[in-house]
Amino acid sequence: MPKAQETVLEIDLKALQHNFNHLKSKLKPHTKFLAVVKAYAYGNNPCEIAKYLESLKVDYFAVAYINEGLTLRAAGIVSPILVLHPQTVNFNLLVEHSLEPALYNTKILEEFIQFAEKEKLENYPIHLKFNTGLNRLGFSKEQIDVVASQVKDNPALEVKSIFSHLAASEDLNEKDFTIRQIEVFKSIAKNFKSTSGLSPWLHMCNTSGILNYPEAHFDMVRSGIGLYGFGNSEKENQFLKPIGTLKTVISQIHHIKKGESVGYNRGFKSESSITTATLPIGHADGIGRQYGKETGYVMIHGKKAPIIGNVCMDMIMVNVTKIACSEGDEVIVFGKNETAEQLAETAQTISYELITSVSQRIKRIFIR
Ligand SMILES: *Cc1c(COP(=O)(O)O)cnc(C)c1O
């Protein structure tokens, strides 16, 4: 790769393929693979990522909202797309673009049934979400009978799957809780199948579920963060490769004297003479203010340069006193060695938040 001359997010599609193959190797041959490409494919560009994953024969995609599904369709994605959190106001767009809704309470189920009947849909694929302990979205197990009675023998609908979501699949201290969730889901599935006479697919696992709970893979798994290179544990991270490298450049170097300050509100006051570098990336690009005041750092020529003072909207200033560097030199914000997970940890957050925050004004470059 040529050295960065501006802020760019380089995305390594070979690493994506590696992660996909690694996660697939954990599954039984018949288990389907759903790739989660919500939130701009976790910051990476959903169209390019989905096109590439489609070429690798992924079975399904999921997005959070209908608009995200429309973006994929406009890019020519033809695979089935599950919309995890649709809103009733956009049902017409959902159906027009063959997006498949997750229905999670009686209000949205009834509204979708009304819509489907009015539009004279036939066997329209839907997915029913059950709550097994996350307490976020989903029917309760007490609602199985009423849900089953509404969907069975309804020619407008086809219940493609019933699914649930794990609350703490990455946290092995919560293993008992997770096993309980899996048991509750199994009993919901059994009950639903016998009351409705239908046999939808079952799915429950996100990335950490895939890695930690093979007994819960069922008919399909749903992976997001793992595809992008993070396994939510040091052990699993070894087998995955972060696909994104966020690079920038040194715009200007300053020599700061003892007693001078750097940045807005004089957020850094120098106790000795130091050298700083100003970089063209700021809180509007996803490097939040919580990374300032020497919390986060970037890498310059393999060395850590702490972010000093307050993060500005479009810039940060870093301390390069101990690093031989010049204006125009390349800077790594995160990548394969110093990862987004490690940088996120400095600010007590997680890789998910940092990578999904990379602003869309930053150019994405795909390495094939
Ligand atoms: C986001 C999401 C996933 C993907 O989770 P990862 O931890 O990124 O693998 C799976 N299922 C649902 C319902 C989600 O909302």
Image (cartoon, rainbow, N blue to C red):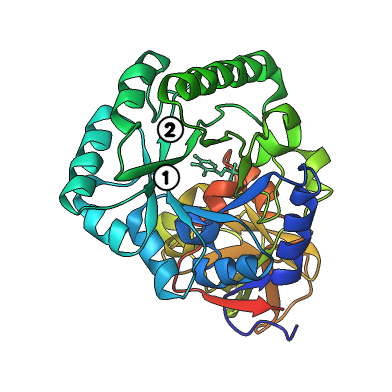
Q: Residue 251 at what x, y percent from top left? A: 57, 80
The structure residue drawn at horizontal position 30% and vertical position 58%, both measured from the top left corner, is: 95
Q: Dot 2 surroundings within 10 Å: few (below 14), some, or many (20 or more)? A: many
| 206 on left or right of 122 | right
In the image, residue 162 above or below residue 39: above
In which of the image's four quarters is ligand 1 placed? top right
The structure residue drawn at horizontal position 61% and vertical position 67%, both measured from the top left corner, is: 54
Q: Residue 262 at what x, y percent from top left? A: 51, 62
Seen from the viewer's position, the closer of residues 196 and 59 is 196
The structure residue drawn at horizontal position 49% and vertical position 24%, both measured from the top left corner, is: 193
Q: Nearer the viewer, mark 2 or mark 1?
A: 2
In the image, residue 179 above or below residue 289: above
Outermost residue on the left side: it is: 118
Pointer 1 residue Cβ closer than 8 Å to ligand 1: yes
Q: Residue 102 at what x, y percent from top left? A: 39, 41
Q: What residue is shown with label 1?
A: 84
The tag earlier along the polypeptide, 2 or 1, is 1
Label 1 element class: loop
Pointer 2 residue Cβ closer than 8 Å to ligand 1: yes
| 172 on left or right of 201 | right
Whether residue 263 is visible, yes or no, is: yes
| Amino acid type for the residue under numbered disc 1 | Leu
Seen from the viewer's position, the closer of residues 362 and 127 is 127
Seen from the viewer's position, the closer of residues 314 and 354 is 354
| 112 on left or right of 64 | left
Quarter assignment of residue 141: top left
| 237 on left or right of 51 | right
Q: Residue 79 at what x, y percent from top left? A: 52, 63
Residue 129 is labelled as 2
* Quadrant showing the C terminus: bottom right
Distance CA(mark 2)–CA(mark 1):
9 Å
| Mark 2–mark 1 CB contact (< 8 Å) | yes
